[in-house]
Image: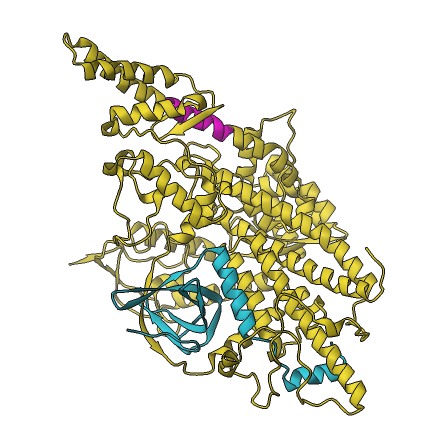
């Protein structure tokens, strides 16, 4: 059945394009022809007509409820409509051009037009201040921001001096008329602890950013409580972190505040748990006490229940306590509590006597730690609490985190597994096993393709210094591509969080040793050239090193079919061989001063990168330890991304510093100055 | 039973293809240094993988290796097997004194 709608009226004399579009917008919304939450679309899109195919007569369109709706007499071929449409196209074109070319002048003109319409008041004063400051901006040390005004159609790309921006930034973000859509330079006011609490300041900052980026409602939950600091987003938006007043506040004030808050929440949660358990035990005691004749076993149980009640405290302080699944007891009572709980079989209440596992750092490898965890849980958990492994395969390794159920089948209490282990290692280990369906020969020389792609990392600005400065060896030659491959693999693996950064650094050393080998070869070749007094050719150069297996070399695709005979493999551990000791060939373009200067610079950057990484990792840890309600997937992902970025940055600097150290050592061996 | 060798492409049950750059035996287990490839067999740099082979009832499975010590061994072996070659391009650079 077709629903007949009202006719769409044409534009009235004196009605602006903007007003008419508002009418169309309302018409479509009222008739459910566009989703109420859909972004504002232009009239042409609403009509779903082609420009050169304007329909006439009745027009049928499906609404949100799936009903056919007839819009009668869509006389879009009328002169009036055509006139409107021409105006509309002109208007749209102007707006588009404006968007492309707009600048401070357009912005202040627009502001002036709006100011003229306003009656005197605070809003007008703010806008006049902004207008005057931008108009008279001498444009020194400019910063770029994007802004739009109320209709949100035109984006103004503004260039404003830093000091001017600081003067108007609060007004810019406070006014309803202007919206900063790119907050590169919009910085929240500084924290003033004399005037406000951390919580109040966080609320302000949260609102500040929510205002700038309304789509990212990442900081305030439904109860108007802060759920996370916007530090991640803010850092991403604001590249000059050292100038960021929020950073210092965040580290010195907000993080301790957050930790304390989380601790308080944990104490509250634990308090509830202990109250619940104490109630249940009290019920058991009452039940047994009410019995007139008790067996000896019941007598013993009654005593045990009383003992247990005595060691499960009513008041939780958060200090010197050990968490069991279901209760918190003092450290000294852990063993006794576990024994009693397990003896009394409180599993029907989902209470198990399991002490908190040792931290991951007590074990040298993931596998050993998981073995420990598994045994730890098996020792204390009754078999009824153990689940089949979620993979459903009996022969799979069992992952302790998923071995037991918790009340209401919820995930076991996070604090029962150390968070860092859970996040960094456990999750990585739970990847599924995949079956190999088929094996085939590659369609092309994948190795070469692979190498070519890897060489592209030399083009990534952040990677470039590593390869450029390590003796300027990475000249995208096929011969060193594998070294690049290993390095690239490490960086990729590290960024994916598979390899801890310290390990990456260790393997980075072997990467450097391969580079050293190339230098050695170069010098040997040069030496051979001098001795023979003949031009260097691709004849077999002297070999060095002892590694490698020749049968494997046969399978290795040569980057160039005309390549010379492969040189026996180097020792990738960096053993340069004895023949290198008297080599006097000059090293690459870098000299001691250059390397020393670079090292000093890198040392500072390395420390910064390490610091940033630790802060980010700490932030993630704190976040993961927080209550469920405080963690949204978006916040978790953002924090993880931040950790990954910092980790990668740190890795790069480590690799670079190692390479330079090695070069410097070699120079020193030649009689250069010591550090 | 499927036999996987170096320089072959394996197709997994999630239809993902990997190019096996190296096959390594370590501690009586078989590992692969692999890289994901697309339908044209172009390598995906973002997808470098370290796999352990698991054989079960004549079926071959792979599992991601996450043990840092094993990855280290794999990389060490990869480096040993793939020594630096001196190509004409490299020799040219040497002659020019570029490095």
> Looking at the image, which residue is at 68% across and 59% down?
A658
Q: Residue A391 versus residue A396: which sits nearer the camera?
A: A396
Q: Which residues are magenta?
A: A261-272
What percent of the width, then of the height, locates residue A107? Answer: 63, 53
Q: Which chain is cyan?
A: B
Main secondary-structure element of the magenta-colored stretch = helix
Q: Residue A228 versus residue A657: which sits nearer the camera?
A: A657
What percent of the width, then of the height, locates residue A172? Answer: 62, 43
Query: Is residue A116 on the magenta stretch?
Result: no
Where, by quadrant of the figure, is residue A144 drawn?
A: bottom right
Q: Residue A165 versus residue A344: which sits nearer the camera?
A: A344
> Looking at the image, which residue is at 37% across and 19% down?
A312
Query: Is residue A266 on the magenta stretch?
Result: yes
**Side of A198 where A471 appears, left or right:** right
Q: Residue A522 versus residue A590: which sits nearer the camera?
A: A522
What percent of the width, then of the height, locates residue A441? Answer: 39, 81
Which color has been applied to chain A in this rendered view? yellow
Residue B42 showing in the rendered view: yes
């Amino acid at each position: 059945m077709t629903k007949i709608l009202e006719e769409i009226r044409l534009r009235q004399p004196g009605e602006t394009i903007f007003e008419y579009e508002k009418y169309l917008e309302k018409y479509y919304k009222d008739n459910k022809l566009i989703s109420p939450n859909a972004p504002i679309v232009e009239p042409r899109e609403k009509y779903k007509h082609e420009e050169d195919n304007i329909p006439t007569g009745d027009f049928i369109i499906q609404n949100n409820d799936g009903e056919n709706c007839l819009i009668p007499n869509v006389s879009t071929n009328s002169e009036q409509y055509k006139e409107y449409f021409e105006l509309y196209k002109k208007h749209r074109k102007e707006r588009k051009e404006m968007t492309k070319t707009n600048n401070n002048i357009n912005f202040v003109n627009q502001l002036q037009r709006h100011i003229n319409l306003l009656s005197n008041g605070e809003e007008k004063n703010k806008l006049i201040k902004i207008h005057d400051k931008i108009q008279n901006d001498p444009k020194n040390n400019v910063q770029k921001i994007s802004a739009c005004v109320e209709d949100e159609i035109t984006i103004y790309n503004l260039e404003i001096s830093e000091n001017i921006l600081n003067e108007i930034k609060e007004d810019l973000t406070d006014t309803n008329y202007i919206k900063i859509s790119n907050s590169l330079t919009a910085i929240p006011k500084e924290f003033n602890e004399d005037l406000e609490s951390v919580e109040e300041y966080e609320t302000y900052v949260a609102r500040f950013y929510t205002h700038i980026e309304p789509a990212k409602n990442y900081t305030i939950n439904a109860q108007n409580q802060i759920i996370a600091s916007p530090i991640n987003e803010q850092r991403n938006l604001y590249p000059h972190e050292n100038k960021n007043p929020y950073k210092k506040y965040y580290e010195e004030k907000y993080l301790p505040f957050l930790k304390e808050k989380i601790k308080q929440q944990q104490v509250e949660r634990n308090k509830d748990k202990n109250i619940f358990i104490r109630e249940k035990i009290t019920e058991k005691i009452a039940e047994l006490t009410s019995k007139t004749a008790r067996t000896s076993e019941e007598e013993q149980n009654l005593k045990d229940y009383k003992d247990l009640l005595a060691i499960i405290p009513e008041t939780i302080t958060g200090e010197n306590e050990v968490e069991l699944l279901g209760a918190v007891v003092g450290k000294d009572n852990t063993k006794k509590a576990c024994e009693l709980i397990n003896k009394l079989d409180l599993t029907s209440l989902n209470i198990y006597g399991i002490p908190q596992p040792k931290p991951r750092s007590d074990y040298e490898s993931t596998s050993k730690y998981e073995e420990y965890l598994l045994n730890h849980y098996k020792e204390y958990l009754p078999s009824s609490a153990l689940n089949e492994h979620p993979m459903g395969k009996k022969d799979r390794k069992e992952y302790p985190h998923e071995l037991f159920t918790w009340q209401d089948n919820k995930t076991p209490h996070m604090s029962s597994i150390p968070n860092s282990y859970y996040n960094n290692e456990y999750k990585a280990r739970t990847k599924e096993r995949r079956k190999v369906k088929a094996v085939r020969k590659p369609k092309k020389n994948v190795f070469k393709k692979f190498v070519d792609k890897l060489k592209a990392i030399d083009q990534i600005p952040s990677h470039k210094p590593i390869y450029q400065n390590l003796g300027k060896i990475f000249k995208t030659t096929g011969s060193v591509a594998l070294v690049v491959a290993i390095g690239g693999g490490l960086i990729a693996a590290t960024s994916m969080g598979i390899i801890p950064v310290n390990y990456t650094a260790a393997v980075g050393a072997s990467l450097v040793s391969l580079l050293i080998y190339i230098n050695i070869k170069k010098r040997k070749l040069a030496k051979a050239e001098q001795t023979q007094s003949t031009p260097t050719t691709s004849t077999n150069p002297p070999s060095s090193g002892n590694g490698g297996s020749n049968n494997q070399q046969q399978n290795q695709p040569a980057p160039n079919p005309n390549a010379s005979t492969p040189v026996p493999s180097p020792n990738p551990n960096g053993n340069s061989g004895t023949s290198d000791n008297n080599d006097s060939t000059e090293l690459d373009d870098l000299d001691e001063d250059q390397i020393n200067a670079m090292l000093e610079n890198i040392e500072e950057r390395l420390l910064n990168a390490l610091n940033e990484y630790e802060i980010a990792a700490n932030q993630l840890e704190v976040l993961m330890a927080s209550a469920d309600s405080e963690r949204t997937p978006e916040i978790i992902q953002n924090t993880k991304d931040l950790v990954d970025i910092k980790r990668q940055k740190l890795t790069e600097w480590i690799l670079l510093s190692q390479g330079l150290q090695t070069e410097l050592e070699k120079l020193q061996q030649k009689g250069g100055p010591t550090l | 039973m499927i036999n996987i060798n170096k320089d072959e492409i394996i197709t997994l049950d999630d239809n993902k293809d990997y190019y096996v750059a190296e096959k390594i035996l370590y501690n009586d287990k078989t590992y692969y240094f692999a890289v994901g490839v697309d339908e044209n067999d172009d390598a995906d740099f973002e997808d470098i993988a370290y796999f352990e082979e698991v054989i079960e009832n004549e079926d071959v499975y792979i599992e991601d290796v996450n043990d840092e010590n094993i990855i280290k061994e794999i990389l060490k072996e990869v480096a040993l097997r793939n020594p630096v070659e001196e190509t004409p391009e490299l020799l040219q650079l040497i002659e020019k004194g570029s490095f």
